[in-house]
Structures are given as C-alpha cells and as structure tokens.
Image (spheres, coloured by chain):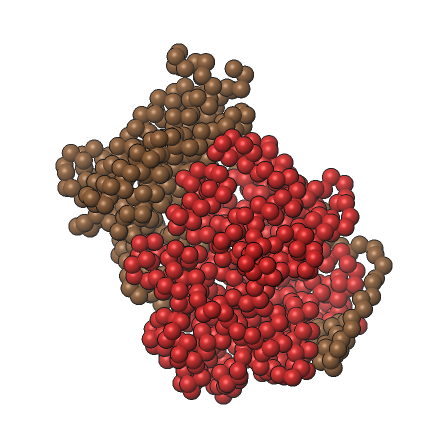
C-alpha cells in the first residue's frame, strides 16, 4: 500500500512458470504452500529453469528441497539484507532507470539510504557473507524476470512493513512489475486473510476505501444507504482491540474463527484478558483453547458445510459449494450474522433492513456492487460465472469479464489522492498524512513510491540474561493452532508435540543432548520443551513451532513473544523474543523426531 | 408505554414520550455536528487540528451508536439523517474555516457543542438505567469537547474571559507560547520530558511533553526495562506509535481530559474474571479415531517426485525442524 497506493498482490501464479528468478523471503513454501512449491519445483525443471533464492533464518524444508541459494540471515534483519540487495543492484546498474524516472518517485532518498548498506556492513548486521549477498543480487538483477514472495517471516517479524516495502521497492528499481514473470507477490497465510483485507473485516473499509477520504465514505454511504457521518472512523487493529480488552475499554469480545488463546503474543497476559471479557466465540470447534474460555459459543459451519467465495494470493475468487449439512446446531457464519442483524434491528436510512440479502449469493451480489469501480472490482463476477470458469481474478468488470491476470501492466499506480487507500503512513510510527498534506505535498500522481527505511534492531534485545533469539514458525503437518489437524491421526503423529530446535554449537556449550528437556525463558514467561539438536538454526537462535498451546501446559511459544505490533500493518510481531535456555537435565523417553 | 423501560417521569410534558422521541433531537444534532466536523477537516490546514477533529468525530460517532442502539433494542428506528441542520452546520463550518481560519471554526464548533450540552443535560434528567448511563457517557464527551474548544480559543485569542472559564489555569493546558494540539490529548501539556515533534522527511507528528511522560509509563515492564537501550529516535518513534494508538488515546481521554474538564477521572472498569487462569476445563484437542487416507499425488518432474516422497516421510521433513 505504501509503495503502490493500495493493497492487492500485483502478480499471478502463472508468473512462476514465466520467470528466471524466484526469491522467497520469510516464506517456507515447502511447508506452508505445498501446492505452490510443487509448481515452483516443476518450473525449475521447465525451460526457464529459474534460480530459487531463499531468505530465511532457518535451513528450512524449502532450502533442502529446492533452493539454489540460501541467505541464512539473523532473525529480524530483513530490512538490512534487502537494503543491501538494492545497494548492489544500484551499484552495478542492474536497475531500470527509465522506469524509475517515469513511474516512481523518491529515488534519490531511496538511493541515499541504501547506499549505507554495503555488503560488508550487511554481513556484520545479518550474518550473511558479503559474497553470498552479491551473488543473490546478481541473480536478481541480471535475470530478465523475477518473482518475489513473502509471508509471515516478513509480516510478523521486526520492521514488518518496512521489509515488505523494501521488496516492492526492489522490484520497482528493476521495473520488474506488471509484466509476465515479474512481480512482488505478497502472500497471505490463507484465503480468508485476503478476503478480510478486501472487504474490510480487519478494521479497514470495503474495497480499499480510504477512511480519511470523505468522498470514499460518501460513496460507500450511498451504496449502503446509511448516513456518511457514521463512517470514516480510524481503523483499530486486532492487537489494539485486545489491548482495549485488557484495559477494560472493551467488555464484550466476539471472536470468530480464530484461536487467540494460543496465537496472541504475550500469551499469559492475553489469557487474563480473555478471562476478563464477556467472550463470544463463533467457531466450528467447541473445544479450542479460546472456546474453553467463552461465555457463549456460537457453533458455526466449516468449509464443505456452507457455500461462499474465497480469494487467493493471485486475487482469484473461487466459489465453494456446500457439500453436506453442518452438524447439530451449527449454522453458517452468514446465517449467524443475518440473525444478529435482525435481532439488532439494523436498518438503513429509509428504515429498510440494512442487510437485505438472505443467502450467500445475495451477499456476493451486494459485494459486487460495493466493489464496483473500486480497485478490487468484482462487479463482473457472478456465481454463475465463477462456477463456469472455476475462478476469476479481480479486477473483473463488464469491460474485462475474464478478469485481470496481473496489476499495473499500464505502469499506472493508484497513488493519486482521490484513489489511494491511505495517505502515506509513517513506517516508524504508523501515523497518516491528512488529506490536505498528502494532496499538497506528497501525491505521486499515479507513480509508485520507492520506500527505504534504515534497519533497526528488534525491540526485545538480547543480553547476558537473555542471550538467544527465539523464532517461531509452522510445520507442514499442522495448521495454525491444530484445531483441525490435531484431529487427524496421521497429521498428529507426524508432529505430536512441541520442541525447541537448538544448534549443535549452543547445545554443546550448554551441555544439552538431543531430547533433553529445556526451559525456555523470556522476559514475559517460560515454556518447557525437549531440545531437538541439529543444524537447522544458527548459533544464538532457537526455533519453536507455534501450533501448540494447550491450556494448563507450558507449550505455547507466544508466551515468550512481546506484545508489540507493526506500526503500519498492526500485525503482531510473533517472530522475535530474547530468551535463555535452562537445561532441566532429563531426557524425554521418546524422541519422536527420529521415528518413522 | 411498555417499551420505554429506561425512562423516568421527571419531565411532565414528556412523560409519555417514548425514548425514541427523547433521543431524536440529540441524534439529529450529533449527526449534524459530525457533518460540520467533516467540513472542518476538509478545510483545516494544520494536521494537529485535523487529528483533534477526527478524535472528536470518533467520540460523537460513539454517542450516536449508543443512542441508536438504545432505540433499536426497543424496536424503534433511530433518525440517523441529521436533518436540515447538518447541511446548515456543514456549510457554516466550511465557510468559516475558509474565510476566517481555525479560531473562528473552533468558535463555531463550540456553539454547536453548547447546544448539545443543553440538550443532554435536559434529557438525562428524564431517563434512568441503561439510557442514563449511555447519556452520561455522551454528556461527559460533550463537556470534554467544550473544554478542548474553549482552551484552544483562549490560547489562540489570549482572551482572559475564555481562560477564566476553564477549571484550571491555562498553562496546565498549554506549555508553549502558541496553541498546538497534541495528537493524543489535544492540548499541549507541560511535562518533565520534551514534547515530541517530527516533520520532514517524516509526516508531521506532535505529542506534548505531558503525554510523552504518560505514554512512557504505559509501556509494559518487559519493554520499559529495555527502552534505554534503544537509540533515541527509536524510543521517540515507539512513543509516538503508542501515543497515537486507540488504547493510549482512550487512556488520555479518561485520565487527562476528564480532569482538565472539571470532571473526575474516569477509570476503565475491568470485567471480573470468570475463572482461574489456565483452568483445565477440557482436554486438549486429541486425534479422532479415523481411518487413514492415502492421497494420490502425481508429480511430473524429478524434483516434484522427490519432494512428495520426502513430504510423506516424516523423518526427512523433521530434519528441517
């Protein structure tokens, strides 16, 4: 958004087959995106044989199964490393000066900042050898096309938005955007994340409308037939909502389809918070850790039990039909919302029912109208067309009924003040320009913005008491907090319990053997896990999967993580905590990771 | 009427009026005032004042939502249109701002607020229960807003009469020589730390000295204990981020703006804990007894085939954990 004026992944999955270079930043695709990873592996065997560069603090399954180059950086140093790559690109002239001059702004500022990140300095910050960085930059800069993906290793790490912007800026420098095989492709953890970004369920307004632009609000108010005066509120992100609960300003929390009792950072505090609010949990499982703390549980249908649409990381909307009825009293989320709206007697400005539709197709038709003319335009889609085509990519309009494979092919970016989703947020504080400031001083008028930020170390610092950095991540056999995968025996057996990965170097120094029980202590709390000793992480770093967090047990890595969030995206920073290891000295009976 | 459950009978001429009728003038006036604020935001050149107006707008939206909910729960339809007054006020504010500037806008806003103050004061006497609590909140916000406007007018005009109408000396509201609006508390309060002000190349941001002190005290101990190790500009950025977030802004409203408006500080009431922390309410999710299903995957290349083989071989994948 800060680069292009609005959200929306610019590329498409087909770009993986049409590129010469693929860069995965904080994205363990082999475990997170298995189908995509097979596609990448197939592309590697195809005519273009793209180089695959992985930027990750761990030697992940992605690295071992398909990387040509691994930049194993220190946790939380994405910005320094990406600045270093941009430095080498500029130094060697692997940039598109014509594109920069015609389609971007702030190149001089950008160059001035990244000039400070020589490969040698980056090596001292990130721990990545200067020559390895140069090699990566050469592959990126000299390939005719590049696709870069990123995921939670960027979004939930130190300087999250700054790093995401650096990736976009790297592509802008080379003019590698809006053409086949070239795109920054900012993934979402799951399609529902894409949907909430677009429809506004995460505190923003539908279809990338700008809360500060009165005309955007006026347009929405007309389409919903509600007073414009009630719209245009500054969005409040999820971590702030939990903070408001903690402080007592929010007394009722309606939690839908997520499990914050395991997934929120500074978890001990969050459990107190969830215990202190009137908690309504709407979920298809009544025994999640969060549901166990609920005052009211609204049983909801899960996929296959309801009809609806999902949009994936290439902006493709697909229709999912209901296959079976939900069990017991469970109802679809939509039915629950409609019932709630009726009971709340929600009306529009003319006294008619505010929510006029009664089924998923009606809801989709309403969304098509709300998005019409906006950046994520769905107006050309319908249930019939989605069923017929198997999915369409937005923007999809009457004029472009087949949808749009990739954004920005015309080199025009939605940064004009009257289109932009936001008026440029300060990367360090999240503060936004006012409309007048943006219009008069900053409006790039359809050009993209090159955003560079200086590296800042993580807030939770290592010291003598907490000398290690703990990072978290996922396993291929688990999904989120195991609410689903914990019920499948095969998946459960594949990764039955929490562990902590420790480097051989650190394990030797601390006298920890493989399988020994270790207490991991941060400034917020402690957990206990068996040590898995190996070469996956570097010295000074430990890794713990985030899936585990049974109530009453000390397994949740988020117990260790600080309650901080990115100033712009409001994503909780779940990947960095300073910790110490305290060997308890007992060896667990079963080292399951050695078993078949 | 049966549905007027939260109404008292203090006012004889309205004793039979349903709650909907009592709240309608307030709703209309509040919405009209929001429309006027929107006009002021569009015309205002000072970003700190825009943030102040946005904060006021948010408070008024809460007032409207609470009153509208009261009406809806009784089966009524709240008049959320603002009436003709919205157009009059909106035009008035827009013209005032463009022609006469910020001070005149503040004065025009105060006229509207004083009208609201009178309406709330009259109406709150006629209701009790939930409606009284909701109107009490709205009245508090209105009193606060009146004081914010008056203090700024006093500072900008140096009018003694305005300053004297405030509950505290003017220098408790403004530490500096000219009127500035802190983006957290909307005043420019004194404090033992310097005010934080950033401009180009950053966006204009301002947090007063008083809020700088208050916000630092809001950091949780695990981060507060490390702040001295962060570079100065990182400390400042983090304070600004925290100060502009909704939780800290609400702290400022309740702990700072209420007392500066002559009201008792309002402390948030945390709900009573429902149960002991981390209760063993139920066993953790455990695998169901199911038949294992073998998935058929058809890789097309050697790389894919190898990946799939390793994917279904737990031991191999686990070497990457």
Image position, residue A31 (x, y; %): 66, 69
Q: Is residue A274 left or right of residue A79?
A: right
Residue A31 visible, this angle = no
Colour displayed for chain B in the image of the structure: brown
As drawn, the residue found furthest toward the front would be A399
Q: Residue at x 38, y 34 (%)?
A: B31
* Residue closer to the observer: A261 or A358: A358
- Position of residue A590 relative to residue B307, above or below, is above
Q: Quadrant of the C terminus of chain B?
A: bottom right
Q: Quadrant of residue A3 in the image?
A: bottom left
Q: Residue at x 45, y 49 (%)?
A: A235
Which residue is depicted at the point 71% across and 69% down? A587
Viewed as shown, does residue A57 lie left or right of B251?
A: right
B287 or A3: which is nearer to us? Answer: A3
Along the line of sight, the residue nearer the viewer: A207 or A149: A207
Left or right of B220? Residue A254 is right
Q: Is residue A494 left or right of residue B84?
A: right
Number of dots carrying numbers? 0
The red one among the chains is A
User: Picture coordinates of residue A50 (x, y %)?
Assistant: 60, 82
* Horizontal and vertical percent position of residue A213: 39, 50
Residue at the right extreme, as displayed = B291
* Residue A314 seen in the figure: yes
Q: Residue at x 49, y 88 (%)?
A: A131
- Determine whether B200 is above or below A540 in the image: above
Quarter assignment of residue A193 = bottom right
């Amino acid at each position: 958004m800060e680069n292009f004026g609005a959200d929306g992944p610019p590329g498409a999955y087909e770009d993986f087959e049409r590129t010469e270079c693929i860069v995965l930043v904080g994205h363990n695709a082999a475990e997170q995106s298995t189908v995509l990873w097979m596609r990448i592996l197939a592309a590697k065997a195809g005519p273009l044989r793209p180089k695959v560069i992985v930027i990750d603090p761990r030697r992940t399954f992605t690295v071992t199964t398909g990387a040509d180059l691994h930049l194993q950086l220190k946790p939380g140093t994405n910005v320094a490393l990406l600045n270093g790559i941009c430095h080498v690109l500029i130094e060697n002239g692997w940039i598109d000066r014509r594109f920069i001059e015609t389609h971007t702004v702030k190149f001089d500022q950008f160059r001035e900042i990244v000039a400070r990140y020589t490969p040698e300095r980056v090596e001292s910050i990130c721990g990545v050898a200067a020559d390895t960085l140069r090699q990566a930059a050469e592959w990126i800069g000299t390939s005719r096309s590049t696709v870069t993906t990123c995921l939670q290793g960027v979004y939930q790490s130190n300087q999250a938005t700054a790093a995401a912007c650096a990736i976009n800026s790297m592509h802008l420098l080379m003019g590698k955007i809006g053409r086949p095989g070239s795109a920054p492709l900012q993934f979402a953890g799951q399609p529902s994340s894409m949907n909430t970004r677009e429809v506004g369920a995460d505190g923003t307004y539908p279809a990338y409308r700008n809360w500060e632009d009165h005309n955007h609000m006026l347009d929405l108010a007309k389409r919903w037939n509600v007073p414009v005066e009630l719209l245009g509120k500054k969005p409040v992100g999820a971590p702030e909502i939990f903070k408001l609960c903690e402080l007592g300003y929010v007394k009722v929390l309606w939690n839908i389809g997520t499990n914050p009792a395991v997934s929120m950072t500074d978890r001990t505090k969050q459990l107190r918070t969830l215990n202190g609010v009137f908690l309504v949990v709407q979920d298809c499982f009544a025994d999640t850790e969060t549901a166990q703390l609920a005052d009211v549980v609204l049983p909801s249908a899960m996929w296959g039990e309801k009809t609806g649409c999902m949009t994936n990381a290439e902006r493709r909307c697909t229709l999912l039909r209901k296959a079976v009825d939900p069990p017991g009293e469970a109802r679809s989320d939509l039915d629950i919302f409609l019932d709630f709206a009726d009971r709340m007697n929600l009306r529009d400005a003319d006294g008619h029912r505010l929510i006029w539709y009664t089924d998923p197709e009606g809801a989709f038709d309403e969304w098509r109208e709300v998005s019409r003319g906006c950046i994520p335009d769905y107006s050309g889609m319908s249930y019939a067309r989605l069923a017929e085509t198997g999915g369409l990519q937005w923007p999809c309009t009457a004029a472009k009924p087949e949808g749009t494979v990739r954004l920005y092919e015309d080199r025009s970016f939605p940064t004009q003040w009257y289109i932009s989703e936001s008026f440029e947020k300060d990367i360090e504080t999240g503060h936004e320009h006012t409309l007048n400031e943006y219009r008069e001083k900053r409006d790039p008028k359809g050009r993209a913005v090159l955003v560079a930020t200086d590296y800042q170390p993580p807030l939770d610092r290592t010291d003598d008491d907490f000398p290690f950095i703990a990072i978290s991540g996922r396993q291929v056999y688990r999904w989120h907090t195991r609410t689903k995968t914990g019920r499948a025996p095969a998946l459960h057996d594949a990764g039955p319990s929490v562990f902590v990965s420790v480097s051989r170097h650190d394990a030797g120094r601390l006298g920890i053997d493989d399988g020994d029980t270790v207490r991991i202590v941060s400034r917020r709390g402690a957990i206990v896990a068996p040590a898995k000793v190996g070469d996956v992480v570097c010295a000074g770093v430990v890794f713990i999967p985030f899936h585990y967090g049974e109530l009453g047990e000390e397994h949740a890595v988020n117990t260790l993580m600080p309650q901080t969030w990115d100033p712009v995206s409001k994503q909780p920073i779940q990947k960095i905590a300073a910790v110490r290891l305290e060997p308890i000295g007992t060896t667990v009976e079963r080292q399951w990771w050695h078993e078949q | 009427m049966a549905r007027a459950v939260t109404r008292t009978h203090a006012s004889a001429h309205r004793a039979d009026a349903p709650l909907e009728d009592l709240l309608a003038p307030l709703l209309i006036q509040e919405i009209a005032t929001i429309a006027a604020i929107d006009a002021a935001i569009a015309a205002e050149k000072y970003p700190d004042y825009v943030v102040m107006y946005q904060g006021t707008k948010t408070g008024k939206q809460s007032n409207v939502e609470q009153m509208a909910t009261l009406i809806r729960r009784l089966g009524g339809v709240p008049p959320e249109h603002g009436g003709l007054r919205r157009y009059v006020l909106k035009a008035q504010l827009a013209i005032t701002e463009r022609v006469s500037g910020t001070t005149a806008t503040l004065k025009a806003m105060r006229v509207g607020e004083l009208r609201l103050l009178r309406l709330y004061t009259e109406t709150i006497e006629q209701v009790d229960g939930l409606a009284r609590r909701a109107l009490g909140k709205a009245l508090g916000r209105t009193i606060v807003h009146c004081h914010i406007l008056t203090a700024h007018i006093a500072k900008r005009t140096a009018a003694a009469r305005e300053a004297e109408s405030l509950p505290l000396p003017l220098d408790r509201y403004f530490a500096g020589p000219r009127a500035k609006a802190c983006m957290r508390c909307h005043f420019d309060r004194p404090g033992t730390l310097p005010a934080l002000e950033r401009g180009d190349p950053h966006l204009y941001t301002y947090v007063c000295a008083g809020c700088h002190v208050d916000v630092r005290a809001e950091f949780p101990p695990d981060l507060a204990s490390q702040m001295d190790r962060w570079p100065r500009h990182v400390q400042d950025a983090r304070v600004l981020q925290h100060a502009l977030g909704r939780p800290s802004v609400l702290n400022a409203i309740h702990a700072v703006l209420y007392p500066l408006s002559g009201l008792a500080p309002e402390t948030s009431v945390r709900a009573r804990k429902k149960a002991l922390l981390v209760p063993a309410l139920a066993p953790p999710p455990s695998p169901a007894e199911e038949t294992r299903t073998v998935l058929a995957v058809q890789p097309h290349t050697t790389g894919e085939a190898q990946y799939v083989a390793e994917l279904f071989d737990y031991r191999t994948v686990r070497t990457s954990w």
